[in-house]
Image: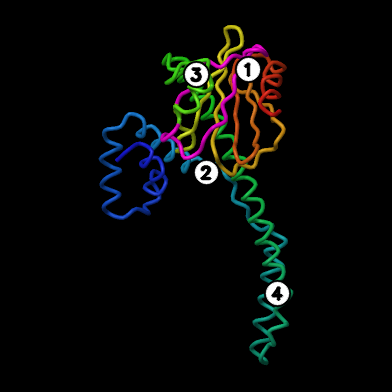
Amino acid sequence: MRCTDAQTLIESYVDGELDAVHTVDIEQHLGDCSICAPRHQDVIELRSRIREEVPYFRASPDLQQRIRAIAREKRAETSRSRVPLWAWSGAIAAVALFALITVGLVRRASESSREQMITQEIVADHLRSLMANHLTDVTSTDQHNVKPWFNGKLDFAPPVNDFAAEGFPLIGGRLDYLAGRPVAALVYQRRLHPINLFVWAAPEKYAEKAIPQALQGYNILLWARDGMTYCAISDLAADEMQTFAALLQK
């Protein structure tokens, strides 16, 4: 089993959704692969954090009392005569409204938690590339060398540009992994400061204008455009990172 195949199956494996043949294959792969095994652990930790950190919303005591009172009243009426369906409309509407509100709140909390986890993983991937001295798999300042290198390694073609004339030269690229999927990591430089630009094709709900964040001393910009999601991270000053993002958004 190749890493690209394993990465697409890890979440289903953790959820117990694979058949026996695929389960055996991926377990053998995870036991031997130093790249996919950490991703497997990341998915397990993500599931655990969602269960622990995403809030569970209960009905307010007032709403609970109202629903119980309506239920008692309707049971009493039922014992005396057959209750028409429309008589339950108030209780049904209240329960339905509460369910819609709860689902919306949980979805927003889940999306926020997912975005935070992606940001934390981006910082971890950036640090790993610096500490392991593994910024690039392909080292080149020529975008026509870097872009074709990703052919067959990803199911999308990342846009690759060189901004040497603007002070942000391309120095290469590598294959990385984020949230259990392979992504393109394009590497730029500003003086002695490396910039990791992660690119992946996914329906992340980021704005087209770069959203600045700061975490662990690094400035991070996230945005989406033309079906791609971008994340730039570096220890450069925030204004220089905005300048770099503006070049990509032209």
Give the labeled residue for mark 1.
163
- Considering the numbered disc 1 on the image, is that residue within a helix, a strand or a loop? loop
Segment colored magenta: 151-174
What residue is disc 3 on? 172
Disc 1 versus disc 3: distance between alpha carbons?
A: 12 Å
Tell us which disc is closer to us: 1 or 2. Answer: 1
SS class, disc 4 = helix
**Which mark sits nearer the N-terminus, 1 or 3?**
1
Q: Which residue is mark 2?
A: 50
Q: Main secondary structure of the magenta part?
A: loop
Q: Which disc number belongs to residue 81?
A: none
The mark nearer the N terminus, 1 or 2, is: 2
Looking at the image, which is closer to me, 47 or 235?
A: 235
Q: Are marks 1 and 3 in contact (CB under 8 Å)?
A: no
Q: Nearer the viewer, residue 231 or 71?
A: 231
The single residue placed furthest to the front in the displayed view is 144
Residue at 64% in and 31% down: 222
**Local secondary structure at mark 2:** helix
Residue for point 66% across, 91% down:
82
